[in-house]
Image: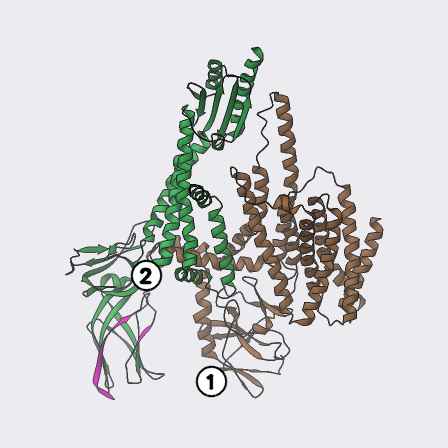
Chain colours: A green, B brown
Amino acid sequence: MKRLLRTLFAAGSSRAVPPVVIGLFLLLYIGVAFFTDETLIALMAFTRRSFFLAALLALIPLNCALRLLRETITYLKIRRVLSGKPVDSIPELFDEDVDLHASPFTPELEGRLAAVGYKTRRSDNAVGAWRGISAFPARLLFLVGLFCLFTGILITTTSRTSNRRTIIEGEPMPMPDGIGGVVERITLANSSGSILVKTLTMEVAPSNSGQGKRTFGLYPPSMYGGSFVYPRYLGLALYLRFSAPDMPAGYETHCSLNAYPPGKEDNVVIPGSPYRIVFSLPVPESGGERYVSYMTGNITLQFKLLKGKEVLFTGSAPAGGEFVRDGYRLALPDIRRLVITDFISDYGVLFIWAAGVIFVLAGCLWLPIRLCFPRREMLFRFDSDRTVAYSRSEGGARIHVGAFHEALDLVDLKRDER
Amino acid sequence: MILIFLQSSVFSLNTLVTLKVLESNERDTMAISLKLIPHLLAWFGIVLILLRGFAGRRSVVTVASIAGFVIGVTGTCILFRSFPVAIPFVVVKSALGVSFLFLWGASIAAIYRSTGRGITIFQGERRGNFPLGAGIAACMASIVAGAICTCGLPAAGSTLLTLLLLAVAAGALAYALAYSAQALDKLLPNSYTVSLSGMLVAVVALLLCSSSSLLRLDLFSPLSMKVMKGVHDFVHQFMESILIPDHLFIRSYIWKFIGLLFGKEVGFWGGLVIWFIPALLIAMAIGFERLPSVAHLRQGAKRRTVMAAAIRERRCRLVIPLLSVVVFATAAYQSSFPSVEYWDPKPLPITADQSGEITIPKKGEIDLEDGKLHKYLFKQGGREVRFFVLMTPAGQLTVDLDACAICKPDGYGQAEGSVICYYCKTLIPLDTVGKPGGCNPVPVAFSVKGENVVIDGITLVNSWSTTVQATARVKEGGK
């Protein structure tokens, strides 16, 4: 059982796992590409539906966790062995080992190593020497980052749910599972930030379900009722009344217009009649703010009334206004701002964000250590007339190997002198 | 000796071409022979590399290479004879794609093996050096090389007798070239050894270089196109995944940077990265290989001698992977600047009548049924629409926009048996022109009234506006 577990641990923590899994996904991607142009989306959908593919993807975070464990054990073992404590299977911890039939003349060996910048520690039967800083903390961070990234991808791929809802000013916040507080105000304003050109703020009053007053911005998206609030597009909520000579009873409806940016057309079909009203917002003069109507709330809609394919007339009317001609009457009593928003339930996003931060930290830590203070270690274990020397380096290998060979020469020289 | 081989190979080459092109004249035969020479040189290089890599297995490699080449040539001829023209091309292109994927896998295994501590992933080095391994490798590579050579020949009908003669001519040619390679191999210094991964990268590089001169076998251009689409999808999905707000809220200069990821150049450079990485990884794997431990040697001079010898030997093994990088570069160049002339007529201005219909006579100054691409330019309300009319090989007239729904509207040119998208260099078989999807030209509804092709002007403009202008904006940095 112990042997089986050891084999599983060795296989699970192998460095070959991520390239093999990624290679398999790449092959699958190539295969899918033969059948559809939306290859990535199709592959994500397959992974979501297939337990086998999800399990295959899960091998990468599992491998990261096992490697984390394995490398931590190795690091601790190296620390132990350099401080002279007994450890099993020392050769596996080092790059190189040499067996000499001589016992080291430790004070001179320590002096020589100190002269080339190594710190030494002598114990009963060993001399450990090292210089530089271990890159292990950076490595640890890197593996944690990798774990977070692939865990995030796995969670996102397999469990993300997205619900598109329309948030209308003055109406209750529509939630995927119920109703939230009333949206008190939607504000779009220019931003002086270096990334976002505008800020969008949605203020929501406390809800009956116990949610307090909340304000939602653009980035990072806030959570509401367990979902991220991810604003996508701006639009207008319109309440209109329409009557025509052949429709004296008239018709009234609430509808939402996807009319931004200005110039974009959206239409309202009058059911059971040949009438269709095409709405758009006037395009501002060149250089003007395109979203000024949304920002100020002074909204004037242009419209085009069609009967079948025939355009009956065109015109414009502000919010609360009315347009009457030839027996036709179009009133726009209420126009409000709306934001088409995705409510995204996905905790994988948090892992992906965390991975980004951890990768940056790992990079900032690794680069100076690797360039300026690479870790180099030696160990000399002696037993009456026999010395076994070990060496490893994380960088600057040529210089380190030179120092190691000189130290070995010194040990060997002492044997000849005796 | 080599001269005799060369004379016999020229004779066999002419025989091979003449057999394949039964009805062509002498000048055509010469031109086609010249076109075949790069493919034969590539195969010659492959045999030379295999002889060097499987030192001690020369006779097996030579015989297997000759047999593989003959099988490749005759097998492909049989495929051309038995199936529609597109099938053999798909088969050979798939074989090339698989070999490139295999190279990728081998290169990753090589880098992991040389950088890992005590990792043994790939036992191929020992196993591959058996006579059977050497024979299979030589045979497989030569089958593909022979198939590429056959794809480079013009299509012609063949009887059983000509097929037999073709096999004999291909065999004679292969014999001459393989024994020339063996003679050259004996002249090269022994210090230039080739590792198994080095051999693999060189063979695949030569096969891809050979195939890149044939439009329908070229892998680099479709790869670039797939990379462009893949990057576009990835960026979009990444932004969705981490909930980055829509473009309307982000500063335009940031969008310009993001827009760079949606351009054609990304496909080209990304394609180059994928193209070169296996060769570079294998070179790096050789460069990172651990030098032998010399710690047991107590004389510094001896240590330095052993190390210097090991470093020299490592450098020699680097020559082939680095030369392969040059071969890959040649393949990418041939693919990006193909020496093929496309039929690409200047679009003729055309107008609609009072009812908004465009009428083009089938047999006027231009014969719409001649199987050639005929381009037109229609202007209405400040908008310009380019479209073309084409008679497909199946005898169906088709009207399509001179653009697809994916790429920037750079238009199409016509080559033998296909049209090519100038933007992403994808070849569209003529049979599939008129069908929507992928990089196919966007089909436009039309009708044939009497001897005229009639197209609705508004439909044409709307079709251009909804699909083509959207792709142009996306590719130029919008979203």
Q: Which residue is mark 1?
A: B354
Q: Which residue is mark 2?
A: A161
Query: Number of labelled discs?
Result: 2
Visible residue check, residue B343? no
Q: Residue B227 location in percent, x, y?
A: 51, 57
Within the magenta stretch, is there residue A258? yes
- Circle 2: residue type: Thr
Is residue B114 or residue A76 the one in the foreground?
A76
Q: Residue A326 location in percent, x, y?
A: 25, 86
**Residue at image x 85%, y 52%?**
B4
Quadrant where the N terminus of chain A lies?
top left
Q: Residue B289 location in percent, x, y?
A: 57, 37
The chain under label 1 reads: B
Location of residue A47 (image quadrant): bottom left
Q: Residue B325 location in percent, x, y?
A: 62, 47
Is residue B42 or residue B84 the one in the foreground?
B84
Question: Which stretch did the figure color magenta?
Answer: A244-273
Q: Is residue B320 above or below residue A169?
A: above
